[in-house]
Image (cartoon, grey):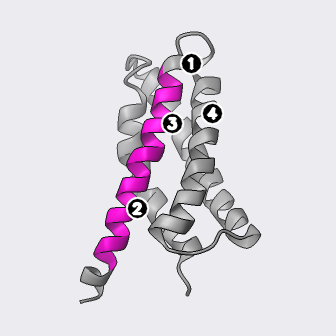
Amino acid sequence: MKQLKQLPEFVRFVMVGILATTLHYGLYFVLQQVINVNIAYTLGYALSFIANFYLTAYFTFGRKPSWRKAFGFGGAHLFNYLLHIGLLNAFLWMELPKPLAPVPVFAIVIPVNFLLVRFVFKPR
């Protein structure tokens, strides 16, 4: 029964995640053609982070953003970013093409991100 109650929350999380990931990847895709891939990836991540925070607070969990949540979200995303950038470089080292390297990264980090972000926004 508890899983059924969490389904709408998870669906909203997926919708926000798709938007944030699209924003991240879109900026990365454009920038990686003209600047270093790590810088392009980081700039895309930063922009998607800001959008993701507000959408996650208001839309996914129906909570007002606060500095406490911002720091918790930032902490979760710091870990998430390090996982992102490490995996991106691992896939580039395995010679995946630069435009495709983020795809397996997203497949790995999105479920991890859900667990971390849910911990920040849901009361204990």
Q: Earlier in the sequence, mark 1 or mark 4?
A: 1
Q: Measure how far apart labels 3 and 4 are at the Cα level.
A: 9 Å
**Residue 75 point in image, percent of width and height:** 67, 60
Give the vertical position of 121 relative to 47 (above or below).
Answer: below
**Residue 90 point in image, percent of width and height:** 47, 30
**Magenta stretch mostly in which secondary structure?**
helix
SS of the residue under disc 2 = helix
Q: Amino acid at mark 4?
A: Thr
Q: Nearer the viewer, residue 60 or 69?
A: 60
Q: Earlier in the sequence, mark 3 or mark 4?
A: 3
Decide: marks 2, 3 in contact (CB < 8 A)?
no
Decide: marks 3, 1 in contact (CB < 8 A)?
no
Residue 31's disc is 1
Taking the spot 46% from the left edge, 28% from the top edge, the residue there is 26
The magenta stretch is 6-29
SS of the residue under disc 4 = helix
- Disc 2: which residue: 13
Question: Badge 2: few (under 14), some or many (20 or more) residues near its Cα, within 10 Å?
Answer: many
**Residue 65 point in image, percent of width and height:** 66, 68
Q: Earlier in the sequence, mark 4 or mark 2?
A: 2
Q: Amino acid at mark 2?
A: Phe
Query: For residue 123, which quarter of the picture?
Result: bottom right
Q: Nearer the viewer, residue 120 or 87?
A: 120
In the shown orientation, is residue 121 left or right of residue 39? left
**Residue 60 point in image, percent of width and height:** 45, 67
Question: Badge 4: few (under 14), some or many (20 or more) residues near its Cα, within 10 Å?
Answer: some
- Disc 3: which residue: 24
- Disc 4: which residue: 42
Q: Earlier in the sequence, mark 2 or mark 3?
A: 2
Question: Badge 3: few (under 14), some or many (20 or more) residues near its Cα, within 10 Å?
Answer: many
Q: Quadrant of the C terminus?
A: bottom right
Q: Quadrant of the N terminus?
A: bottom left
